[in-house]
């Protein structure tokens, strides 16, 4: 990612779009496989009690609150010939693939000792994921100044996320089976996939444009305070957290739903196919809807589809397995929109903050975002584990199967339908308070669809552009934005324009 800012580019080349998008295999696999299989792995292979297993999944995420914000801050201030973000992609690639394989290595342990082992290796894996994912998510806001181009850019990312989720949801359970050896093979296989994807995204973004100020100012405390004062960021973080939590609960419950409600463990694979299939074909539709309804309207629609589809699954005992798959397809259509729109809106929030502040703080925003996202995803599995525990679910291992009580079967169904539906609907209600529309963002950033006079808002409220030059009256903003358009030979940060 080259460092010198270009004069308000609106388009991103196809090569850069694909180069960036391939990194989504890391996002999809690490977000999906632990959420889908790690709870089941501990309760049904390592004989870890469900309540303890849920806690183990959540505790490493407390560390994320520190690690993600620090990585975001570091990437904001990084000066490198590869740009501020890309060196961190390599750092993540050095840590995550190996630690991911270790999580599922299947040591000869059961119960509490096995829980401790999984907790430690999962902590290391989440650290590697933070090193990669935080700067990775900050990059789209810095590639283009166009509100709708960000959605188009992220469309490619979401298509490959769908492919990655399909790989995770279909291949991972098939490889893992229900044995420790199967899980070990799966962990190694997907560790290799993670490594290839992370390296490919590093090289694929070598020619990405860079439109942000050169680096952030102030202390980490001041940067975090700035994030907390962004109303748009806080509302987006809240509604996204609700969506992520709802999806996390449903994801953790999928293997249990297949095994105990459908009485078909192999249905986990077909359920995932029904979920991600719509993501592969509806992305152009959601891009179009985001233009017609604005992103907020499209987000409300997608959340409503997710909520409705989840509630419809309740009729599965009466209507059968095919009906369940059709309901999951409805959920998948809504999930596709949620995934695309929340990250496009995050890029808008970062661009808005950069225009107002004149500083590069996208890493701090994405650090907070990723920390909360990871914690909420883990909380989904934890919450489902609590629902199972409340229903009297009995943990076991393959050599000692047990018959679950009726209350456990009810808990399996409620946990995968009513609970995620209510949480996601809360996100729909929060979306009504989000107000960063295309016109409002363009008025601040001088982006597409805005007249020159509207773009030239004065002083600390804007960093308008006229032919790529900043139009600000405040000296601090003039200096900050001026660094972003300095030619490679003008200062020490010009070295970043060389490409790795």
Image (tube, helix red, strand yellow):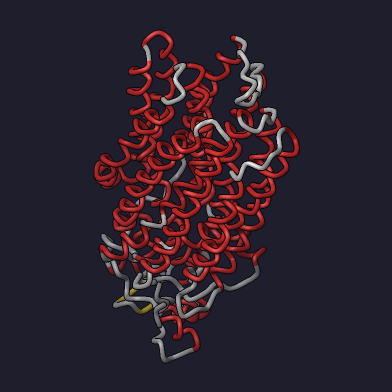
Q: Quadrant of residue 209?
A: bottom left
**Residue 83: % across, % down:** 46, 75
Residue sticking out furthest to the right: 112
Q: Is residue 473 above or below residue 309?
A: below
Q: Residue furthest bottom?
A: 489
**What residue is shown at x 54% (from left), y 69% (from top)?**
76
Q: Quadrant of residue 308?
A: top left
Quadrant of the image containing the N terminus: bottom left
Say which residue appears at 44% left-offset and 35% top-offset. Answer: 174
Viewed as shown, does residue 173 lie left or right of 71? left
Give the mark count: 0
* 279 shown above or below 255: below
**From the viewer's perspective, is residue 258 above or below residue 294?**
above
Up the image or down, 261 lies above or below 44; here it is: above
Residue 372: x and y, percent? 58, 47
Q: Quadrant of the C terminus?
A: bottom left
Q: Closest to the observer: 102 or 84?
A: 102
Q: Could you tell me residue 478's position as x and y percent?
A: 46, 79
* Between 354 and 401, the one nearer to me in the picture: 401
Q: Could you tell me residue 188's position as x and y percent?
A: 52, 49
Horizontal arrangement in the rendering, residue 324 relative to residue 89 (left or right): left
Q: Residue at x 29, y 54 (%)?
A: 152
Tell me where residue 202 sits by quadrant. Answer: bottom left
Q: Is residue 424 left or right of residue 205?
A: right
């Amino acid at each position: 990612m080259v460092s010198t800012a270009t004069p308000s580019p609106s388009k991103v080349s196809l090569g850069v779009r694909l180069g960036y998008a391939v990194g989504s295999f890391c996002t999809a696999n690490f977000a999906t496989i632990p959420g889908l299989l790690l709870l089941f792995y501990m309760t049904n292979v390592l004989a870890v009690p469900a309540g303890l297993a849920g806690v183990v999944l959540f505790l490493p995420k407390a560390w994320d609150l520190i690690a993600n914000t620090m990585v975001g801050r570091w990437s904001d201030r990084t000066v490198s010939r590869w740009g501020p973000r890309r060196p961190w992609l390599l750092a993540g690639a050095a840590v995550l693939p190996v630690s991911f394989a270790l999580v599922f290595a299947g040591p000869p342990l059961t119960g509490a000792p096995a829980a401790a082992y999984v907790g430690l290796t999962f902590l290391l894996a989440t650290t590697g994921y933070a090193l990669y994912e935080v700067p990775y998510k900050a990059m789209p806001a810095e590639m283009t100044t166009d509100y709708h181009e960000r959605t188009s850019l992220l469309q490619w990312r979401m298509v490959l996320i769908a492919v990655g989720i399909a790989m995770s949801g279909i291949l991972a359970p098939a490889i893992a089976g229900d044995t420790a050896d199967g899980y070990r093979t799966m962990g190694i296989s997907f560790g290799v996939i993670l490594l290839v994807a992370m390296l490919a995204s590093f090289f694929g973004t070598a020619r990405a444009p860079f439109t942000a100020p050169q680096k952030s100012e102030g202390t980490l405390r001041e940067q975090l305070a700035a994030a907390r004062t962004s109303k748009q960021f806080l509302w987006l973080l809240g509604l996204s957290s609700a969506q992520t939590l709802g999806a996390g609960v449903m994801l953790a419950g999928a293997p249990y739903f297949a095994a105990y409600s459908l009485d078909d463990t192999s249905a986990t694979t077909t359920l995932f196919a029904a979920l991600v299939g719509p993501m592969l074909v509806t992305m152009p539709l959601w891009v179009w809807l985001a233009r017609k309804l604005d992103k907020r309207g499209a987000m409300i629609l997608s959340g409503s589809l997710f909520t409705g589809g989840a509630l419809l699954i309740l009729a599965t005992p009466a209507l059968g397995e095919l009906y369940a798959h059709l309901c999951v397809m409805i959920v998948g259509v809504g999930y596709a929109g949620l995934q695309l729109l929340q990250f496009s809106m995050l890029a808008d929030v970062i661009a808005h903050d950069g225009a107002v502040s004149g500083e590069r703080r996208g890493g701090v925003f994405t650090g907070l975002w990723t920390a909360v996202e990871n914690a909420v995803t883990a909380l989904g599995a934890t919450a489902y584990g609590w629902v199972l525990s409340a229903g009297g679910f009995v943990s076991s291992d393959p050599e000692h199967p047990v018959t679950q009580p009726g209350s456990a079967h009810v808990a399996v169904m409620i946990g995968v339908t009513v609970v995620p539906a209510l949480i996601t609907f809360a996100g729909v209600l929060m979306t009504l308070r989000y107000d960063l529309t295309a016109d409002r963002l363009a008025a601040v950033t001088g982006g597409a669809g805005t007249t020159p006079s509207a773009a030239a808002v004065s002083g600390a409220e804007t960093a308008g552009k006229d032919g790529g030059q900043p139009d600000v009256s405040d000296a601090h903003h003039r200096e900050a934005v001026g660094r972003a358009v300095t030619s490679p030979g003008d200062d020490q940060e010009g070295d970043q324009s060389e490409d790795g």
